[in-house]
Image: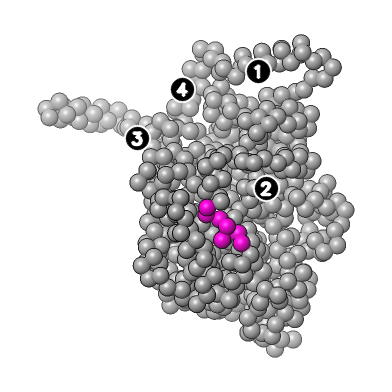
Amino acid sequence: MRLNRFHRNCTLKYRWSTGFDWRMLLSGAWFETIAAALLAILVLATGYRPPWWFWTRNCNASADTGDNSRKFKTARDVPGPFALPILGTRWIYSRFGYYSMNKIHEAYKDLNRRYGPLCKEEALWNCLVVSVFSRRDIEAVLKRGSRYPLRPPQEVISHYRRSRRDRYTNLGLVNEQGATWQKLRAALTPELTGAGTVFGFFPALNIVTDGFINLIRERRASRFTVKGFEELAYKMGLESTCTLILGRHLGFLKPDSSSTLTKRLAEAVRIHFTASRDAFYGLPLWKLLPTSAYKQLIESEDTIYNIISDLVETTMLEKQDDARDESVEAVFLSILRQKDLDMRDKKAAIVDFIAAGIHTLGNTLVFLFNLIGCNPEVQEALYNEARTLAPPGCDLTVDDLRKAKYLRACITESFRIVPTTPCIARILDEPVELGGYRLDSGTVVLLHTWIAGLSEDNFKDADKCLPERWLKPMVPHSPLLVAPFGAGRRICPGKRFVELALQLILAKIVREFEIVVEEDLGLQFEFILAPQSPVSLGFRDRESRAEMT
């Protein structure tokens, strides 16, 4: 005890005499910066070379002697930013680099301009990550069939879930690979991906959409403007997803309901995304000590799990269907009926499904409404189609939406111009030649479908919103590049639900309101594309517009 007191006194005297607190220096971002600099100096001074350095040279030498008729450049020859030993290129997203974490989507556009159709980054220990921007190369990877497509796991989330065996027996659908992933997919998603379930959910979705419309009317401030519209969109994402998964209307869209729970959950999901982004693109010091990104991820994961777990427990106790449609509850019940899964797996899957629906559906609604509001001619054509589907105030059916071809084209065009997911990540399970470079199996590739979809090489008038291109294709036309839900066997299981929900919501909103955009929408990267808050959108009643004319 005397030694501890002596140590504290010495520390205080030293701090007073120097006016500087070294413990402050060794905390947070400063520690990361100093650690990275010291490690780089040490590596450069000692002439360290990782194992791949010798392996690559030897492989190239053996390849040259074996086949002189055709020589491939390897992934190591792909151009890209300067890589530090061990730390790779992650420095470009630090305070010493060119790019900001919340603008990584813009960073990849710049990397494409600088280095061309292929760009190489290097993660920790100089592991390769190759960005692919060319339509031909993207399609070549997507068309390669595989029984168990490999997707790069989010390492920080995998690490956390391995440490919480009280909650998780596996890494979840997103991060698992191989036979384990296939088992989870087969057990958890059949009802969610089935047409019967989503179509049976449709009457309940009409009710939820009407609640969304009423909430917009209540929240309009001056005349017709809704400030902070993204909060309403997240409420819609939560309410509609819970209605599908749990078979219950939870009342998040009621104007007089408390929004505390929704705000907490939506904010926790946002922090979860940004912490995952910072851990992936930042220096991986979370493996050595609990960095701010890792602490935020743990806190957000706990918040999401606890809130949704309470909803699940309440539903399990009540066992009631507020939507009065048995098919609505099929997703929840089908998961609970799985005998081969641990209860921890069932609860974790439900938590993941609901959490994923909040921001993905919410952000997509913001992007879609903003795009429609920015293009008056498109909105007028959309309104003319929507009002023929059913009389104002009446519910829409699945058959009604089958006739709404222009509406579906508007949604597809929105996916092309501003998708929530701007790229598809894969791990190559066999060697492939892309752009004259031979990429070995095990190489991580990022397929930048969004950037490719905005190129004039792949779509005519790519910078314009032209839903007509999906009704009468214009050359060039590359539909495989529009993949907001991923592609292949690892496609998002909620694809059918989100697409149908967007169709119904857009049809009813445009029937009731004229969407007015008063300011430019900013984008930020949160591991998915998200709008910069707060978002202001106008919703002018169609009746009031008729009176004005």
Magenta span: predominant SS is: helix
First of labels 4, 1 by sequence position: 4
Mark 2: which secondary structure? helix
The amino acid at mark 4 is Leu
Report which residue position mark 1 lands on: 56
The answer to the question of whether label 4 and label 1 lie on touching residues, with beta carbons closer than 8 A, is: no
State the CA–CA distance, disc 2 to disc 4: 44 Å
Q: Residue at x 69, y 85 (%)?
A: 391
Say if 402 sits above or below 2 in the image. Answer: below
Residue 488 disc label: 2
User: Which quarter of the picture shows residue 414?
Assistant: bottom right
Front-most of 325 and 514?
325
Front-most of 148 and 470?
148
Q: Position of residue 404 (x, y in %)?
A: 74, 72
Name the front one of labels 3 and 4.
4
Whether residue 389 appears in this view of the structure is: yes
User: Which quarter of the picture shows residue 128?
Assistant: top right
How packed mark 1 is, by other alpha carbons closer than 10 Å (few <14, some 14-19, many 20 or more), is some
Report which residue position mark 4 lands on: 38
**Quadrant into which the N terminus falls:** top left
Task: State the count of labels.
Answer: 4
The amino acid at mark 1 is Thr
Front-most of 443 and 198?
198
- Specify the segment rendered in magenta: 187-194
Report which residue position mark 3 lands on: 24
Q: Position of residue 510 (x, y in %)?
A: 68, 75
Q: Residue furthest front?
A: 339
First of labels 1, 2 by sequence position: 1
Name the front one of labels 3 and 2.
2
The answer to the question of whether label 3 and label 2 lie on touching residues, with beta carbons closer than 8 A, is: no
The answer to the question of whether label 3 and label 4 lie on touching residues, with beta carbons closer than 8 A, is: no
The amino acid at mark 2 is Gly
